[in-house]
Image: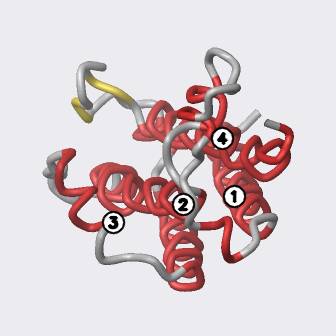
């Protein structure tokens, strides 16, 4: 199996899953944070089941990660300098400026497209070359990094779908 082709396809498909999950929310519910973690009858562990963020905030988080970490990191494999990652506090500052679902989804589609374009430009030798030092993981390959982005999407996509499907059950 050609992992570049496979993972590029997965980036596209998991992006579509995020878009689908967002489409399941009403406009009112989209920006609502789960109150279940403070509800007196909420079962133990409900906060981790739904997460703390609204669906729109989750979408922003995915977008922010991909615009500021995933995309700049992939660019390193096609000759750009080692990226400088933002401080974690910067995400919250940027979130305060964003609340438009359509614009966020458009940006998310675009950053996914750009990542796929870069994956297709990385040569086979460099694809598996551990050349980028990433947050406590030592040197990692482009293959590892794209796999990490997909894992990140699964993790937050799971929370989105839980909110969309089970919110009213609790």
Residue at point 49%, 77% (across, down): 107
* Left or right of 1, for residue 136: left
Disc nearer the start of the sequence (2/1)? 1
Q: Is residue 56 positioned above or below 52 on the image?
A: below
**How far across and down, in percent of the image, does residue 36 sit?**
63, 38
Q: Which residue is mark 4?
A: 159
Q: Which residue is mark 2?
A: 59
Residue at point 40%, 32% (across, down): 141
Disc nearer the start of the sequence (2/4)? 2
Query: Are dots 2 and 1 in contact, CB under 8 Å?
Result: yes
* Mark 4 Cα shell of 10 Å, populated few (<14), some (14-19), many (≥20): many
Quarter where residue 40 is shown: top right
Q: Is residue 79 positioned above or below 35 on the image?
A: below
Q: CA distance from mark 3 to mark 1?
A: 18 Å
**How far across and down, in percent of the image, does residue 81 sit?**
15, 55
Q: Which residue is mark 1?
A: 18
> Which corner quadrant holds the N terminus?
top right
Q: CA distance from mark 2 to mark 4?
A: 11 Å
Q: Is residue 48 positioned above or below 123 on the image?
A: above
* Left or right of 98, for residue 105: right
Disc nearer the start of the sequence (1/4)? 1
What secondary structure is marked by label 3?
A: helix
State the residue in front, 125 or 57: 57
Q: CA distance from mark 1 to mark 4?
A: 10 Å
Q: CA distance from mark 4 to mark 3?
A: 19 Å
State the residue in front, 86 or 113: 86
Q: CA distance from mark 2 to mark 3?
A: 10 Å
Disc nearer the start of the sequence (3/1)? 1
Query: Are dots 2 and 4 in contact, CB under 8 Å?
Result: no
What secondary structure is marked by label 2?
A: helix
């Amino acid at each position: 199996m050609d992992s570049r082709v496979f993972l590029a396809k997965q980036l596209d498909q998991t992006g579509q899953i995020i878009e689908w999950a967002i489409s399941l929310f009403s406009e009112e519910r989209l920006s609502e944070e789960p109150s279940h973690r403070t509800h007196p009858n909420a079962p133990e562990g409900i906060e981790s089941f739904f997460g703390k963020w609204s669906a729109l905030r989750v979408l922003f988080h995915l977008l922010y990660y991909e615009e500021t970490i995933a995309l700049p990191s992939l660019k390193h494999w096609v000759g750009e300098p080692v990226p400088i990652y933002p401080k974690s506090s910067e995400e919250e500052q940027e979130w305060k400026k964003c609340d438009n679902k359509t614009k966020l989804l458009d940006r998310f589609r675009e950053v996914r497209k750009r990542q796929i374009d870069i994956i297709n430009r990385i040569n086979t030798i460099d694809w598996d070359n551990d050349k980028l030092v990433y947050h406590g993981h030592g040197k990692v390959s482009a293959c590892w990094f794209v796999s990490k982005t997909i894992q990140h999407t699964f993790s937050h996509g799971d929370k989105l779908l839980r909110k969309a499907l089970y919110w009213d059950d609790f």
